[in-house]
Amino acid sequence: MRVNLIIAIITTCLLQVSAAGFAQKVNYVKQNTTLHQVFLEIKKQTGFRVLYSDQNLNSQTKINANFKDSELAQVMETLLKDQNLTYKMERKNILIKTRPTAFPQTNTILKEIDISGRILDKDKKPLPGASVSVKGTNKVVSTDENGNFSLKGVDEQAVLIVSFVGYLRKEVPVNGLRSLNIELAEDVSLLGDVVVVGYDTKKQSELTSAVSVVSSEKLKDVTANSIGAMLQGKVPGLQVVNSSGAPGSNAEIRLRGVSSVNANQSPLFVVDGIIGGNYDPNDVESVTILKDAGATALYGSQANAGVIIVTTKRARQAETRFEAKVSTGFRTADFGNMKLMNGNELYDYHKEFYRDYVVGASNNSYKIDLVKFYSERPLSLRNQDYDWSKESFKKAPIYNFYLSASGKTEKNDYYVGASYYKEKGTFINTNFERVNLRGNSTYHFSKKLDLTNNINLSASQGRSYDYMDAYYSFLNMPWDNPYDASGNPVYVDGNSTFKWWSRDKINPIHTVQNSNHPYRGFNVNYDLGINYRINDWLTFASSNRLSASFDKGTNYVSPLAAGTYRGMGYLDELNTLNYGLISNQLFKFNFKFGEHSLNGFAGGAFESSKNETSGASGKGLPEGLNVPGVISSNQVIIGAHNKYILQSLLSQVNYSYKNRYFLSGSFRYDGSSNFAPSKQYGGFPSVSAAWAVSNEDFLADNHIFSNLKVRASYGITGTQDIGASRFLGLFSLTTKYNSMVAAVPYQLASPNLTWESKRQINAGLDIGLFKRVNLTVDVYRNDTKDLLLQVSQPLSVGFETKWENAGTVINKGIELGISSTNIKTKDFEWNTDFTLNFNNNKLSDFPSDIIKTGSWSISQIYRNGGNLFEFYMPKWLGVDAQTGAPVWEKIIYNTEGKAVASERTSEYAQATNQEVGSALPKYQGGFNNSFRYKNFNLRVSTYFNYGNKVFSNNLRFMMNDGHEPYYNQIKLPKDAKIWSGPGDTQATEPSPQNAANSTETSTRYLKDGSYFTIRNIAFSYTLPAAWAKKISMSDVTVGITADNVATFSNFLGQDPQTTITPTRYATPGVSDFKYPNNRQYLLNVNFSF
């Protein structure tokens, strides 16, 4: 009795507490708020904390709250209305949970009905292969090709569960209905919010590293044929240089400057999650750029220069979708500010060669001897004006055709894309064409097992050119015509009577017609991926790639061509075969406990590649035959085999708490065959963290910050990319003695050679304002230590250099990226993207100064405290007003080697080499705008580069003060003046009679390489959906684009965009007679059905 009384009292008290709790009042009125905000208000006003699972409830769901003095129970009922959820109070907590299924009383008669319906996407298109099941039973069917389904004998109060790959799962109460049309929403987490980073994916909100993503939306109007050109100006910190306009050429890419002297500084490309691989720009879905070590360290020794991840297209909707693109147009050569003299201008310029001035003579009149001039330069030359560049560079057509098909079912999704690209070069007899075929598919064997197959086939061919042919197309004088009276190219050589040809008397039109430089290539990649979900938290992921490529290049000069090989001909042929294997085996885990999340992976990677080359060259070819077997003179046979292996262990752990605090750590252990056995392994760790400040409670009610995140990372990457066998002592077997092969020492052994390592630190801030402006700022410092250098050796060693680890490059910079929606209405929208990157580097720990001298005696110096690619040459001081001689600067040093004074000198041998500027820019970036008015779209993309120096080697020949009187000349700037006599203080150019050594390497030809370019303008019109539907299309867009529209620069020469890659034949920052970049104009038609 007493026990029963106690129970009754306790129960009554609990009921009173509960009733009192639910009787509490809530006041909260706000439009377009979230459930999360309402729960915070409930806690604030009543003290009750609302607890729920993210799997059951989306707390970011938007609602209009209108609670005025409402009881807590009423508020909860309103919030959970139309959701299969209920709630329960425990102490000061309100627990939200799934509403239990109501079972009928045993005396209730169950009524069964037959159901039919259709499963659709948001565009009312059918989803074939969708799964429709009855909850709590084993009844399940799949939709047909039109999205239809039917179920028999279903309880009229049952709940249907509908699911489809790529879409959110949906539960639908039957409620006695016999016909249902059910619409599924796309899983946004699979479509846009997920970023591919390293060997896994992350939501953008979870990123702790410096990562930029360029979506398909921002790439769709780009008509460039390479990823580099597509990305120019769109990514903070990404420098893109189009150093050649030759057909099939690719842009040079640098991410956050240059951090090494000899190692490859191009970012590592990863295609569909596997290092390397080929792709067609038409197949690209998105591009992700990993910048700091927090993101790149997982690629260890291959990621020293950053990582660019290319994700190709896959199916995004159920029914088969066809997409086609047709682009056609033309290109014209862009010669920049290199304006050549016409016949009349060159005639007047040559008068300066006849000025009466002999150095040291006392009777100089300084007047032009017109009598002698007219006798040697007939007046008729004024009317002889042949434009060599116009004849050598023509308007060139370009074509690009693309067709794809994609679709998905519950079991399979696929994408197939095919493209054909062809461009004729603006320089005569050059071209490039490529055929590409890609197939991506994923088969879902079960809920546990997925199998992915990707294959890419690519075949290309084209014709290249001889540098000297382009060289003479600029230098030949306008006073002679390359064609005879019959229109045939004139043969010219050193014995010809033609007087006005270039010094070497070469007709490039004739040479091009009597030479051939073809190349061809074939490439295949096959990817196999296996994804097996062992249980709810553990997955095994295997990704593998087999690749093979074959390339063949030929250079042929006919015996009929003028020049060195006249009467003999020349041929060289090189064949290259590459094949490789990459295999990654990972175990991925994912735990969630309360508000904590822990995920990551661990596993191994293996990479192997083999390269085989063979070729032949020689002279003595019969006319009309161009195969190695007919070579009769100076025959050389070459061949080589190289093998490379990289083995790795890798792991990563990611932790998050409350979706506010994120921590990530990774470690990779690489072993490379490029080093001696004792030095083959290196470890590359990283750690990164982020704080999503905008998810904190104290910013819950703010209307300013839609996103606010602070990031930081530290890590180490490395490089071993200097080629195989650099640590070995090598012998060359190319020398013969008494008809026998002789072994000659070729390379000193370097058994202690080891990895370059880059220590990277990064701090970043991501800010979203008013849901219209997104700002990203990153500050970084990268220290690359133990540089792989060829260090000078004592003469007693017998070798000039030896591979050693020495020196450090310190690279620092700031990146800024801004994206904004300036105006957005129903009919009009204006968006802006702005990127900016400041970068500088310093060298330290070098054992001694290293001076690299390239072609034409152009030098760059590497020394402690200096910059990379720092030009090293005398300073040009102009013209001696009394003598017309060139003047350079001579530095006077004291006994301690310190500069104490400077003086002017006209003796080039006495001029002092100095550091005069780097080929790397101080800052660069892009400014892009897109406009939409109804169905019209306009995009304008620009790019700028500031603060670098470019040596215009063209000017050495085309502003040569009469040294080469048989070369055409560039038009002198308006403020330029040739010296005319003593006291001419306005002269900027030396006297042709006193210009000895004036064309030697100096800052006379070193120019400011800054420029601003309108990179791309795209204008398009999209047909209204109703119009497109009438012609059986789902989307039709017609547009025109213009690339490389205009470049604004003070650079005097062909183009300020020059190579930034040091090679045996090229020096960074040197502008020579390159294949000019092109302006491109295209008509584009895109349609899908």
Image (cartoon, rainbow, N blue to C red):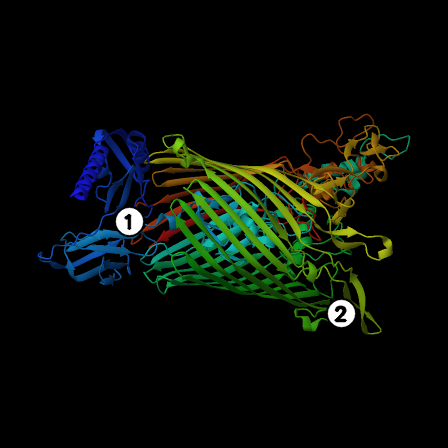
Q: Nearer the viewer, residue 1049 or 919?
A: 919
| Residue 700 drawn at (x, y percent) | 37, 33
Question: Which element type, helix, strand or loop, lies under badge 2?
Answer: strand
Determine the residue positioned at 29% across, 33% down: 42
Tell me the residue at 28%/49% (across/down): 123
Q: Position of residue 122 (x, y in %)?
A: 28, 49
How many marks on residues?
2
Note whether residue 1031 is visible. yes
**Label 2: how many residues lie within 10 Å, few (<14), some (14-19) or many (20+)?**
few
Which amino acid lies under the numbered mark 1 shown in the image of this protein? Lys
Q: Is residue 395 visible?
A: no
- The residue tagged 2 is 633
Residue furthest front in the image: 2
Question: Could you tell me if the residues under marks 2 and 1 are in contact, i.e. CB atoms within 8 Å?
Answer: no
N-terminal label among 2 and 1: 1
Q: Position of residue 510 (x, y in %)?
A: 66, 57
Quadrant, the N terminus: top left
Q: Nearer the viewer, residue 984 or 804?
A: 804
| Residue on which disc 1 sits | 122
Q: Nearer the viewer, mark 2 or mark 1?
A: 1
| The one of 323 and 443 positioned closer to us in this rendering | 443
Q: Is residue 643 above or below residue 841?
A: below
Give the quarter of the figure containing the C terminus.
bottom left
Q: Give the vertical position of 324 relative to 1025 (above or below).
A: below
Quadrant of residue 142 within the rendered picture: bottom left
Indicate the position of residue 885 as horizontal and vertical percent values.
82, 34
Measure the C-alpha gap from mark 2 to mark 1.
72 Å
Q: Is residue 476 left or right of residue 912?
A: left
